[in-house]
Structure formats: structure tokens, C-alpha cells
């Protein structure tokens, strides 16, 4: 009886926490589907479902949601691909090899996890301005890759250190060098950590508002966080419908990427469990 009561209590608590977590999202969606001229507050169920707020947000030339989405997609894809590739290499080196200075070098990488990111933005701005890289893709790509390497290296090193040594030794016995062992033996079994790392880095890069507003001042190159900031803080700060519609369009690519990679992650875990 006690276990049944405890289980019921646990379900109730989890339901309340889930409701608390999804309430802002549900409220945002409902507000966004109200007409742009409607008066809304809280859970504003639309009397007439309308896409007018989405249309107004999309066609706003000053914010340029469509253009900003394209820039952020290019930025996020480049950063994730390069960062994951480099993290695999560094993680493989620190996780499977022992060389002089490896402990000190790994500690330097991990040190990047405790350095406040905000403290590096202003020095980076002046350094990039010196090399005429401000208001270019490089002003976003290079800092995002550099900022991702500390976590990516730590993440992949933890996986490689837990990788069975017997498989590595068997590959070397068959004549495979370290490069072939990495890409033919280790990486094919590392789908889950790689997908999880890619998801995390994509979300971090996509939501990097501070770097976007410091490094990019040209409207033609602004990223989605800066475009959303335009709706929140400037012209449409009091028009909740258009602001919520813009927020949904900005968040939609992240939700799609998370859903696709999360399904792949779950499939890899299930496959590993079946094989085991």
C-alpha cells in the first residue's frame, strides 16, 4: 500500500513539474495564433485562429527573420561539424593515448569550462576588429568553435576512456594504424555521444545572443537571437502576438534538430542494449 501511495505521489509531483515547465510554451503558442490586433494575456485561447502574427513577423524587413534564420543555420552547421570533428580528435588523443604533457594539456582544455564566456567577448571584439573580421561570419564561427572545444574535448575524452581496450588492441593487431582505428572501429560505435554533443553544441550556437549583438552590427548579417531581440525590445515589445510568433519561428529549428538527433540517440542506445 505504501509503495502504491509513493508511486502515485511521485506521478503527481512529476506531472506538476511537467505542467510548470510546458506552461510558458503552451502560452506562447496560443498567443501567437491570435490575430495581431487582439488583446491577449496568459493562456489566451484564440477566438479566431490566425497566422497573421507569423506573417507580420516574417515579412518585417528590419528584423529579417528569414534572412537571420539562414545565417544562423549556416553558422550552426559549420560550428557543429568542425567542433565535433575536432572534439573527436582531441578526445581520442586524450582518452586512448599517453604522451608527455597530456595531463597538463587536458587540464588546459578543461580550464575553458570554468572561464566565464562573457569575460572573453569584449577582448575578442577588439582583437577581431584589429584583423577586420567584425561583421563577418568568421567573427561568429571562430569564437563559437573555440568556446565549444573545452566541453567537446571533455565529453569525447570521457567516452574514449571508457572504450574497451580489447577492441583497440585487436585493431592494432590486425595492422590498423591509429587513424584507421579511430574512423573504422571507434567512431562507428560512438553514435550516441557524438549525436548528443552535436545537439548540445547546436543549441549553444543557435542561442548565442551576446556574441551575435557584439560581433555583428550589419542588419544583413544578423543572427536569429538578434532578430528576436528586435521584436522583444524595440518595435513590437508591446505586441505579444507578433513577438511570440517570432519566438516560435526562432525556436522551431532547434526543436526539429533536437527531435531528429534525440531519435537517433535513442536508436543507438537501444541497438547497443540489444547487442549486449
Image (cartoon, rainbow, N blue to C red):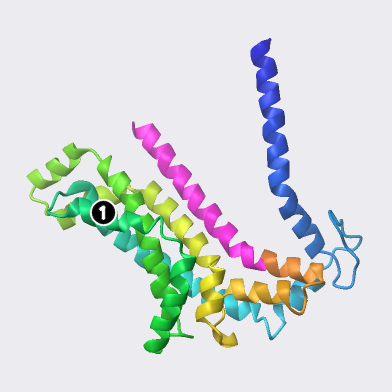
Q: How many marks?
A: 1
Q: Secondary structure at mark 1?
A: helix
Q: What's the magenta bit mostly, secondary-structure-wise? A: helix
Q: Is residue 188 visible?
A: yes
Q: Which residue shows up at 30% across the image and 58% down it?
A: 109
Task: Residue 240 in the image: state x and y as whole percent.
Answer: 80, 67
Label 1 crowding class (10 Å Cα cut-off): few <14, some 14-19, many 20+? some
Task: Residue 75 in the image: state x and y as whole percent.
Answer: 47, 73
Q: Relative to the observer, which residue lies in front, 134 or 63?
A: 134
The segment highlighted magenta reads 249-276
Q: Is residue 151 above or below residue 117?
A: above
Q: Relative to the observer, which residue lies in front, 117 or 86?
A: 117
Q: Is residue 266 above or below residue 1?
A: below
Residue 59 lies in quadrant:
bottom right
Residue 239 lies in quadrant:
bottom right
Answer left or right for 22 relative to 272.
Answer: right
The quadrant of the picture occupied by the N terminus is top right
Q: Is residue 36 above or below residue 110?
A: below
Answer left or right for 211 relative to 188.
Answer: right
Q: Which residue shows up at 34% across the image and 51% down it?
A: 154
Task: Residue 251 in the image: state x and y as whole percent.
Answer: 63, 63
Q: Which residue shows up at 87% across the image and 56% down it?
A: 45
Q: Can you identify the residue that label 1 sits on?
A: 106
Q: Is residue 189 visible?
A: no
Q: Relative to the observer, which residue lies in front, 188 or 106?
A: 106
Q: Is residue 255 magenta?
A: yes
The quadrant of the picture occupied by the C terminus is top left
Q: Which residue shows up at 86% across the image and 69% down it?
A: 35
Answer left or right for 79 relative to 208.
Answer: left
Residue 252 lies in quadrant:
bottom right
Task: Residue 74 in the image: state x and y as whole percent.
Answer: 48, 74
Amino acid at each position: 500500500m505504501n509503495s502504491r501511495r509513493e508511486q502515485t505521489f511521485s506521478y503527481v509531483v512529476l506531472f506538476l513539474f511537467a505542467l510548470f515547465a510546458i506552461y510558458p510554451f503552451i502560452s506562447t503558442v496560443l498567443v501567437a495564433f491570435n490575430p495581431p490586433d487582439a488583446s491577449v494575456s496568459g493562456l489566451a485561447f484564440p477566438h479566431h485562429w490566425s497566422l497573421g502574427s507569423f506573417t507580420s513577423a516574417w515579412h518585417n524587413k528590419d528584423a529579417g527573420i528569414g534572412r537571420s534564420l539562414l545565417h544562423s543555420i549556416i553558422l550552426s552547421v559549420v560550428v557543429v561539424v568542425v567542433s565535433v570533428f575536432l572534439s573527436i580528435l582531441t578526445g581520442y588523443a586524450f582518452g586512448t593515448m599517453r604522451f608527455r604533457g597530456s595531463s597538463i594539456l587536458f587540464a588546459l582544455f578543461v580550464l575553458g569550462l570554468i572561464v566565464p564566456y562573457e569575460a572573453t567577448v569584449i577582448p575578442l571584439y577588439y582583437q577581431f576588429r584589429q584583423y577586420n573580421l567584425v561583421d563577418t561570419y568568421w567573427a561568429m564561427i571562430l569564437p563559437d568553435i573555440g568556446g565549444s572545444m573545452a566541453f567537446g574535448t571533455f565529453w569525447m575524452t570521457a567516452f574514449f576512456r571508457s572504450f574497451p581496450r580489447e577492441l583497440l588492441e585487436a585493431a592494432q593487431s590486425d595492422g590498423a594504424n591509429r587513424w584507421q582505428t579511430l574512423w573504422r572501429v571507434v567512431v562507428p560505435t560512438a553514435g550516441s555521444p557524438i549525436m548528443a554533443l552535436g545537439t548540445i553544441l547546436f543549441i549553444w550556437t543557435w542561442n548565442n545572443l551576446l556574441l551575435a549583438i557584439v560581433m555583428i552590427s550589419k542588419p544583413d548579417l544578423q543572427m536569429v537571437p538578434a532578430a528576436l531581440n528586435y521584436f522583444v525590445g524595440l518595435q513590437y515589445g508591446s505586441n505579444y502576438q507578433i513577438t511570440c510568433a517570432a519566438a516560435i519561428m526562432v525556436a522551431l529549428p532547434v526543436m526539429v534538430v533536437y527531435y531528429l538527433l534525440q531519435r537517433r540517440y535513442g536508436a543507438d542506445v537501444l541497438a547497443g542494449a540489444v547487442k549486449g
